Amino acid sequence: MKIHPTAIVDPGAQIGAEVEIGPYSIIGAGAIIGEKCHIQSHVVIEGSVKMGAGNLIGHATVIGTAPQDLSFDSKAKSFVEIGQDNVVREHCTIHRGTAEGSVTVLGDGNFLMVGTHIGHNCTVGNRVIIAPGGMLGGYVRIDDQAFIGGGSRFHQGIRIGRLVMAEGRFTKNLPPFLGAAKDQVYGINVVGLRRADLSAATRDEIKRAFKLLYRSGLNTKQALEKAAEMEFGPAGREFFDFVANAGKRGIVSYGGAPTED
């Protein structure tokens, strides 16, 4: 363990083996820091935080502070849970949950670039990349291996599906496997799907699902009914299950130019 003499670590914090804590960082009572984490300078980690092993927490990042919610009761005990092997760069903020006992979750292997904000009660999956300045309102869910463009903003309560590429401001749910910008779908995230080593057959299935939902001329209800009659594998079912459970906010609409295929 290597703790800089200017750092303040509460005796009630649990610090794992081989952890490094940099100058002027503050670790609160009750915080749990897994082994081999590297906490850089001027970081604040409050007692509501539990993190696994191998995380890098960048300079001036703040984790576990009270949510930005006018209804929040300051006496409520809520939490932040962080997995392992995450890179959280400089000036990021991750707020704890609003309701008593609620949690903001960051999974494993994520990369949050400079200035990312994760609002209260958000859930970020695994291997998600958020470019500088990404902002998640409360209760946003980002599924595994999504790529979020710089400066993107997400309205509270929406979900962003697995393996999407999204940039801009979003107020509706974005189904998995798609590329979208400014609340409009422009097509399939072809590059992301190939990088994830999805087979050609799986990519073709996703293409069929996309065309049925966005290019067939059917409305969402009709497309779901049609999909139920068709044979889709796991990826296609994942796509339509997401759409079927999108809730009152619905899904991002199609904004791409029509093509001949």
Image (tube, rainbow, N blue to C red):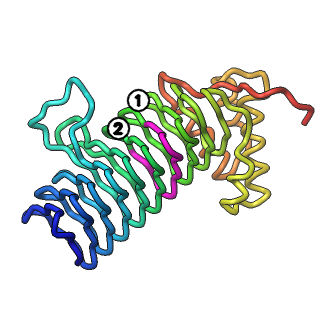
Mark 2: amino acid: Gly
Task: Tell me the number on the disc at residue 156.
Answer: 1
Query: Which of marks 2 and 1 precedes in the sequence?
Result: 2
Using the image, determine if residue 200 lies above or below residue 217: below
Secondary structure beneath dot 1 equals loop
**Residue 253 locus on image (x, y percent):** 65, 25
What range of the chain is rendered magenta?
123-135
Q: Main secondary structure of the magenta part?
A: loop
Magenta span includes 126: yes
Q: Nearer the viewer, residue 160 or 41?
A: 41
**Residue at figure coordinates x 13%, y 38% from the top left:** 76
| Residue depicted at x 21% and y 38% | 66
Q: Give the quadrant of the C terminus.
A: top right
Residue under numbered circle 2: 119
Single out the residue that lies furthest toward the right: 260
Q: Residues within 10 Å of mark 1 (few under 14, many from 20)?
A: some
The image quadrant that residue 176 belongs to is: top right
Instruction: Between label 1 and label 2, give the one nearer the viewer.
Output: 2
- Give residue 205's position: percent from left, percent from top: 75, 48
Label 2 crowd bin: few (<14), some (14–19), many (20+), radius 10 Å: many
- Identified by mark 1, the residue type is Gln
**Vertical relation: 258 (above or below) 91:** above
Question: Quadrant of the rendered structure where residue 59 is?
Answer: bottom left
Image location of residue 7, percent across then percent down: 18, 63
Residue drawn at point x = 26 percent, y = 55 percent: 42
Asked if the residues shown at circle 1 and circle 2 are in contact, with their CB atoms under 8 angstroms apart, the answer is: yes
- Is residue 207 or residue 75 the one in the foreground? 75
